[in-house]
Amino acid sequence: MLLTTAMVVRAFDFSAPAPTGQMLNYTITSATTVTVAAGSPKPAGRLTIPDTVRGYYVTAVANSGFSDCRGLLSVSIPGSVATIGTRAFSGCESMTSAYLAEGVLTIGQMAFSSCTALDTVSLPTTLTQISAGSFGNTAALNRREHWQDSVLYVGNYLIASMPQRTGTIVLADGTLGIANIAFDNCNIAKCVVPQGFHFIGDQAFMSCTHLDTVHMLDTVPPTLAANAFQGASSSLIILVPCGSSSAYNAASSWSSLTIVEDTCPTPPTPPVPPDPPVGLQTADAQPITATVDGNILTVSGAEGLPVTVTDVAGRRILSSHSAQRDMRIALPAKGIYIVSVGTSAPLKVCYSR
């Protein structure tokens, strides 16, 4: 009699509970890292994936790792996870929220597709790629109130656009990236990309045959997928800030495009200095002197300038313009007098005999 033994093949190396209690499966990928997937039974409720488990860092969510977990309501993914795999959470139809911590780098193709209740998504600033269909058939994409100016943002990333949109699209300030195929078959003529931008994804502007200008506002070129403009208009130009064309031409994938610098601003004309005010003494002007002989005060070098004489108590003796280079004034009594001529420093004189 032939005996057969059924063999159970495990596609993971060990199981351990999540911080929220659900059982998760882990596959060792190196001496220090693992990928994570749903355990048995499939996780439900609110799930928090740990950043470490049994001394390993959790660095990836496996392809299809949590697909069709229909009882899953939300997921929090730690920053140790660099990659969320293809279809990682697809079909989680009850999931309403997903929180991705700073540190997550890539979201795989159709990672959250058909999560039809998914309405709240928090994305980190560290993302470098959002693959095609990552949020396809989700509430975030399907609800029209989430769309702005015919484009859909999830967090600081542009995910999709409406192909019927024409003219110019100015991306919102603070936008960090454009997802793969976000503008495929678009009919826009111009796209303005703000400063601080991080990446333009695969086939982002594929077959945009009407697109003739992409205006980059940052002097630092963002990461550009090699096929971002596949099938786009042959007359496409990339307009970059004054003085930054060399940086764009030196950056990967940009050099194959037509880079044109924006017009450099004309430097402002320096203001013409005003004429010096009356009484201002120039370097070549005659020095101003004040001398006393008897009771006669003689002020020299004051021609055309205002002259004021006061006693030490501040009582004004004279206030006039000198018509001649030497101005003579009779002092009323012995004492100390202050002579001010134009803007020169006041002079002190003494009438003592």
Image (cartoon, grey):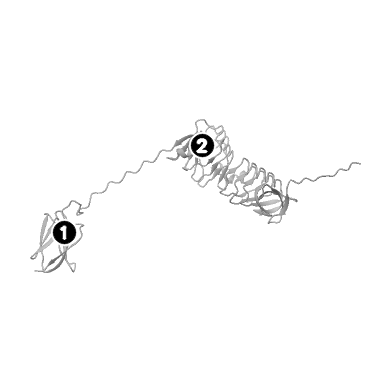
Instruction: Please state which amino acid type lies under the numbered disc 2.
Output: Trp
Residue with the most extreme top position: 234
Q: Is residue 188 left or right of residue 135?
A: left
Disc 1 is placed on an element classified as: strand
Disc 2 is placed on an element classified as: helix
Quadrant of the frame with the N terminus: top right
**Which circle marks residue 27 in the picture?**
none
Q: Foreground: 251 or 38?
A: 251
Mark found first going from the N terminus, 2 or 1:
2
Residue at 14 percent across and 59 percent down: it is 289
Residue under pointer 2: 254
Q: Is residue 246 visible?
A: yes
Q: Are marks 2 and 1 in contact (CB under 8 Å)?
A: no
Reply above or below: 216 against 125.
Answer: above
Q: Foreground: 88 or 209?
A: 88
Query: How far from the left and from the top, in percent, is residue 65?
Result: 69, 46
Instruction: Please state which amino acid type lies under the numbered disc 1.
Output: Val
On the image, which quarter does residue 86 sit in?
top right
Residue under pointer 1: 307
Residue at 11 percent across and 58 percent down: it is 327
Q: Is residue 50 visible?
A: no
Q: Is residue 285 left or right of residue 296?
A: right
Q: Is residue 81 left or right of residue 249?
A: right
Q: Is residue 53 left or right of residue 176?
A: right
Quadrant of the frame with the C terminus: bottom left
Query: How far from the left and from the top, in percent, is residue 59?
Result: 64, 49
Residue at 17 percent across and 57 percent down: it is 306
Residue with the most extreme front position: 31
